[in-house]
Amino acid sequence: MGNFQNLRVWRTAKDLTVEVYRLVRNTDIKRDFGFKDQIQRSALSIPSNIAEGDESGSDKMSVRHFYIAKGSTAELMTQLIIAFEIGYINSDFLTKYIDECDKISSMLNRLIKARSVNS
């Protein structure tokens, strides 16, 4: 605990967040202010909650924040699917980002299990 930048899941989630911000800047999403705000918030919540959980000082609190990050990952996946279905992104972007979300969710599952053993 306490060095979140060394967590592979945090780095992966942070990189995905940067990509989502770039995606928003370069697609029709930028003109849909409500959607833009929501998708950015979802993405930003993932690495933020991983960092907060890792710095929380207890395994129980860490697990709680990791579950929140996992929920934000599902929220982002939902918004990406909607972005595809309404024509904001193409299938290549959808596949790429959904795969990243799946990877993050799996890594969070393993981290939750590891931290749950100690709490």
Image (spheres, grey):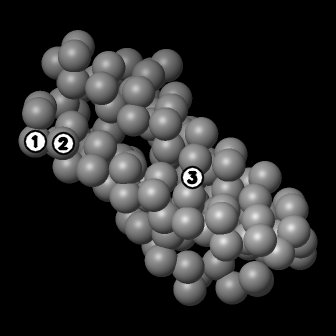
Q: Where is residue 41 in the image (x, y as percent from the top left)?
A: 56, 39
Q: Quadrant of residue 35?
A: top left
From the image, tell me which residue sits under label 1: 92
Indicate the amino acid at tag 3: Ile
Q: Which amino acid does label 2 sit on?
A: Thr
Please report contact status of discs 2 and 3: CB closer than 8 Å, yes or no: no
Q: Residue 46 carries which label?
A: 3
Task: State the residue position of label 2.
Answer: 95
Say if residue 22 shows up in the picture.
no
Q: In which quarter of the image is the N terminus?
A: bottom right
Q: From this view, report whether residue 82 is shown above or below residue 23.
A: above
Mark 2 closeness class: few <14, some 14–19, many ≥20 residues within 10 Å? some
105 or 20, which is in the foreground? 105
Local SS, label 3: helix
The answer to which image quadrant residue 19 occupies is bottom left
> Residue at (21%, 24%) from the top-left corner?
84
Label 1: which secondary element:
helix
Label 1 amino acid?
Answer: Asp
- The answer to the question of whether label 1 and label 2 lie on touching residues, with beta carbons closer than 8 A, is yes
Tell whether 35 sits left or right of 99. right
Q: Earlier in the sequence, mark 2 or mark 3?
A: 3
In the image, residue 50 sits, relative to residue 43, either above or below, namely: below
- Residue at 77% of width from left, 71% of height from top? 117
